[in-house]
Image (cartoon, grey):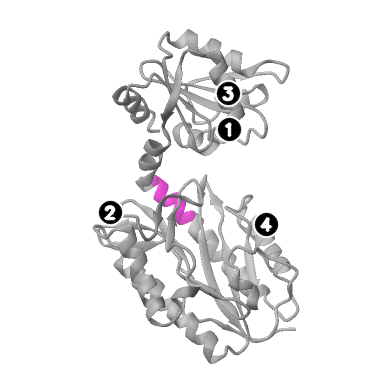
């Protein structure tokens, strides 16, 4: 579970202990997932001692029965978790001088409480960049889970397209998708709120579903994903409900061309910023550059958004095993929005998407 690599990093970087606080990161290293809510959930890793999980007492047995085969220590709501963490750390090691923390997830209050137990120790080092790079390369097992999540997203598109009818609200369509995922596929968690946007609402990329009603001859944008065995999918499609205008067809085809060109260019050796430019240049040359208002893509794995960012200014060289989205968009305020998105993996032969819903403009018949 890569804990040996974390331990080696501690030794190489001169750190004694890593305090892992992000539940997703803990799951990555241990195989155990849970939502601690307001309680304390942590993984303590050491340069020369065995790691342990610390969690609420009500989750101890669950953790022990998970994939994790190390020690698990718990605390009651009436107890001080920080003093118990300190006690267990001191039983493990006398070397507590240098701590590495996840600076992008550890709250200030928790940092202060942890530090109060070790007032002479240093907590300046950040383990987050190391973890980002470790998670950047997916194993075959991880890719299989991402493919499973992609298949669920393809199913969700079919449900969503079928649910479109005149007068249906964006929220009702999104609700149908979520409901059918649960009862037909057993999906209990989406990777983010299912987005359905009709007409001019789609020009606001992250508006989310509203009570806006679908009308004839509008473009309808879907952005959705599921969690499959701890791994996320994220995909977008835009369809025409009724007869699209020439302008609607034009922006759709420009965006589709840009996305396809980027998929074909995503091979080992290209940089993230070069890949962004492949799609951005097509949209810009077509006269819509000002309406492409976000990066081309983001990493995906246990999080729906993770490292790396496929964006201008990022000179990261793409390599085999890296997984990310390719999602150019054109958003014209007051008119319409188009986004086409697939997540996939870079292989020696190119980019292999996890979703396969057709990307030719789908024209849906009007329904009452």
- Quadrant in which the N terminus is drawn: top left
- Quadrant in which the C terminus is drawn: bottom right
Answer with mark 2 or mark 1, whichever residue precedes in sequence. 1
Vertical side of 260 occupied by 272: above or below:
above
Which stretch is magenta? 141-148
Question: Can you tell which quarter of the image residue 73 is in?
Answer: top right
Q: Is residue 280 left or right of residue 333?
A: left
Residue pointed to by mark 1 = 107
How far apart in space, not on screen, are marks 3 and 4 (Cα)?
45 Å
Answer with mark 3 or mark 2, whichever residue precedes in sequence. 3
Residue pointed to by mark 4 = 183
Secondary structure category for the residue under label 3: helix
Secondary structure category for the residue under label 2: loop
Secondary structure category for the residue under label 1: loop
Q: Is residue 188 visible?
A: yes
Residue pointed to by mark 3 = 112
Mark 4 or mark 1, whichever is nearer to me:
1
Dominant secondary structure of the magenta stretch? Answer: helix
Question: Is 158 in front, or is 45?
Answer: 45
Answer with mark 3 or mark 4, whichever residue precedes in sequence. 3
Q: Is residue 314 left or right of residue 59?
A: left
How far apart in space, not on screen, are marks 4 and 1 (Cα)?
37 Å
Estimate how packed mark 2 is, as few (under 14), some (14 to 19) or many (20 or more) residues with alpha carbons within 10 Å. Answer: few
Q: Is residue 358 visible?
A: no
Look at 57% across and 90% down and name the residue there: 245
Mark 3 or mark 2, whichever is nearer to me:
3
Look at 31% across and 22% down and name the residue there: 11
Answer with mark 2 or mark 4, whichever residue precedes in sequence. 4
Residue pointed to by mark 2 = 317
Estimate how packed mark 1 is, as few (under 14), some (14 to 19) or many (20 or more) residues with alpha carbons within 10 Å. Answer: few
Secondary structure category for the residue under label 4: helix
């Amino acid at each position: 579970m890569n804990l040996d690599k974390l331990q080696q990093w501690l030794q190489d970087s001169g750190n004694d202990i890593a305090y892992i606080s992000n539940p997703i990161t803990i799951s990555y290293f241990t195989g155990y997932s849970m939502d601690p809510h307001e309680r304390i959930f942590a993984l303590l890793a050491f340069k020369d001692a065995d790691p342990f999980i610390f969690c609420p007492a009500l989750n101890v047995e669950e953790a022990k029965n998970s994939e994790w085969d190390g020690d698990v220590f718990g605390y009651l709501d009436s107890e001080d978790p920080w003093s118990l963490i300190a006690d267990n750390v001191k039983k493990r090691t006398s070397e507590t001088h240098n701590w590495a923390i996840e600076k992008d997830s550890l709250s200030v209050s928790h940092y202060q409480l942890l530090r109060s137990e070790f007032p002479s120790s240093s907590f300046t080092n950040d383990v987050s960049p190391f973890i980002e790079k470790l998670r950047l390369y997916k194993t075959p097992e991880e890719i299989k889970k991402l493919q499973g999540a992609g298949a669920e997203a393809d199913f969700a598109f079919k449900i969503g397209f079928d649910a479109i009818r005149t007068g249906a609200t964006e929220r009702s369509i999104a609700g149908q998708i979520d409901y059918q995922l649960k009862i037909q596929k057993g999906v209990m968690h989406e990777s983010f709120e299912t987005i359905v946007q009709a007409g001019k609402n789609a020009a606001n990329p992250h508006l989310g579903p509203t009570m806006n009603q679908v009308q004839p001859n509008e473009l309808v944008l879907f952005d959705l994903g599921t969690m499959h065995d701890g791994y996320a999918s994220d995909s977008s499609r835009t369809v025409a409900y009724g007869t699209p205008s020439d302008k609607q067809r034009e922006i759709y085809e420009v965006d589709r061309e840009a996305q396809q060109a980027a998929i074909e260019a995503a091979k080992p050796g290209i940089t993230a910023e070069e890949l962004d430019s492949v799609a951005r240049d097509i949209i810009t040359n077509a006269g819509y550059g000002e309406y492409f208002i976000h990066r081309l893509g983001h990493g995906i794995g246990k999080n729906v958004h993770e490292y790396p960012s496929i964006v201008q200014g990022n000179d990261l060289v793409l390599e085999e095993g890296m997984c990310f989205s390719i999602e150019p968009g054109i958003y014209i305020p007051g008119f319409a929005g188009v986004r086409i998105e697939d997540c996939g993996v870079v292989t020696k032969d190119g980019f292999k998407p996890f979703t396969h819903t057709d990307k030719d403009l789908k024209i849906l018949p009007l329904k009452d």
